[in-house]
Amino acid sequence: MMNTTRRKRAMTCWGAAGSLLLCIGCMPELRRPLSAVDQMKFRQEAITFLKQAATSNDPPLRIQALESLQVVAPAEGLPYIVDNIDNGYAGVSFAALMSAGAIQDKRCVEKARIRAEDSDPHVRIAAIYALHRMGDTKRTSELGELLMKHPDARVRANAAVAIGRMGEKGSASLLRTANQREKKDVVKMQIREALALLHDQHATEELIFAGFSAVPDQSLPAMAFLAEAGNDRAEDLFRLRLRKADIPEQRLIAARGLGKLGNDAGYDVACAHLYFRSPQRDRRNDPPDQQIARIRSLAALALEAIKNPECLGPLYDAFHAPEQSMSAKLAIARAAVGITNPLAAGAAGLNTARR
């Protein structure tokens, strides 16, 4: 009886691993740290790639690069963020202004004042947010007007994003009023996210509830926000989704959320999906190449959150894979910089002490 039980358990474990092997392909090496010298070489290569992407002719790639530089390399990325504030593509200008506001570097203040007069309401929102973060609050109230009155739902949604990121608890009542009046789901989701950033308990619970949904269009954005925020109240949701998910994206976002909470339970899942190459062919409006790029990107972001240096070898291999898409390569570069930042800081401190 004991041997039979053991055999069943082994078959169960093999079945889970086998499914992963079939999904990913030949199982790659999942834990391979780099030497201190190679870590710094990879870090510099990744930062150089992020900077190059921030000058790309592809607006979505440029936007992704600006957001990445703001998070993992703000000092190195600031000149590129500042240059993109004047970009003629509204989405790029929006990303640059939001990044400048997050960094709070007052050298951008005059550029932000100019863009606060822009004809594009999305650019105005980001410029007003940046000004607020830099200490100029004279126009902050305009965000509330855009949230409550603008006819375009996308504008209202971005206004909610900006209000939430400002972190002013006094904005919660405005957001609650807007939520009661709002009819569009996309705007209501952004309002809930903004309220959750302001530690609103009811909004956080709504996001957690949405994260348990069987409908990916509901669960994924809610989980992504909770993971980005590192919300410890969502830990049970992340643990469940890591074990039981309908699509890989749910597991990878759960791995990231747990990583933000200091839990590395999703390491193997995330590292294996750096090599994902088995998309679902029957997904409507979701081409296989797009699925592969998205899932590999989510895997890299999960590893960035987990911050285990043992993944630097796999990240290096994935970064240099010949078939790697630019968007996935950018996410891998961001992860490499984020993971090596503490290592680089430690090396700098050691060199200073030696001198």
Image (cartoon, rainbow, N blue to C red):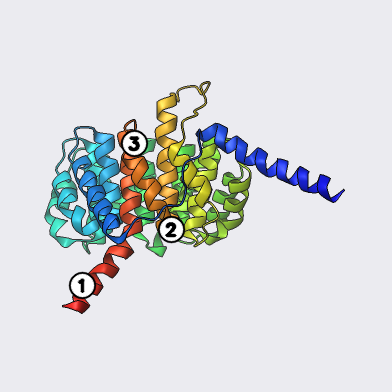
Query: In this figure, which residue is indicated by the disc labeled 1?
Result: 351
Query: In this figure, which residue is indicated by the disc labeled 3?
Result: 321
Q: Which residue is drawn at 19% across and 38% down?
A: 119
10 Å crowding of disc 2: few (<14), some (14-19), many (20+): some
Could you tell me how far apart the alpha carbons at marks 2 and 1 are, in whole angstroms?
Answer: 23 Å
Left or right of 240? Residue 296 is left
Labels 3 and 1: the sequence-earlier one:
3
* The one of 82 and 312 positioned closer to us in this rendering: 312
Marks 2 and 3 in Cβ contact (< 8 Å): no
Query: Looking at the picture, how far across and down is residue 20, in whole percent?
Result: 57, 38
Q: Which amino acid does label 3 sit on?
A: Ala
10 Å crowding of disc 1: few (<14), some (14-19), many (20+): few
Left or right of 325? Residue 20 is right
Q: Which residue is drawn at 57% across and 57% down?
A: 235
In which quadrant of the rendered image does the C terminus lie? bottom left
Q: Which mark is residue 294?
A: none
Q: Which residue is drawn at 53% across and 55% down?
A: 204
Query: Looking at the picture, how far across and down is residue 229, in whole percent?
Result: 44, 56
Query: In this figure, which residue is indicated by the disc labeled 2?
Result: 308
Mark nearest the camera among 2 and 3 is 3
Q: What residue type is labelled 2?
A: Asn
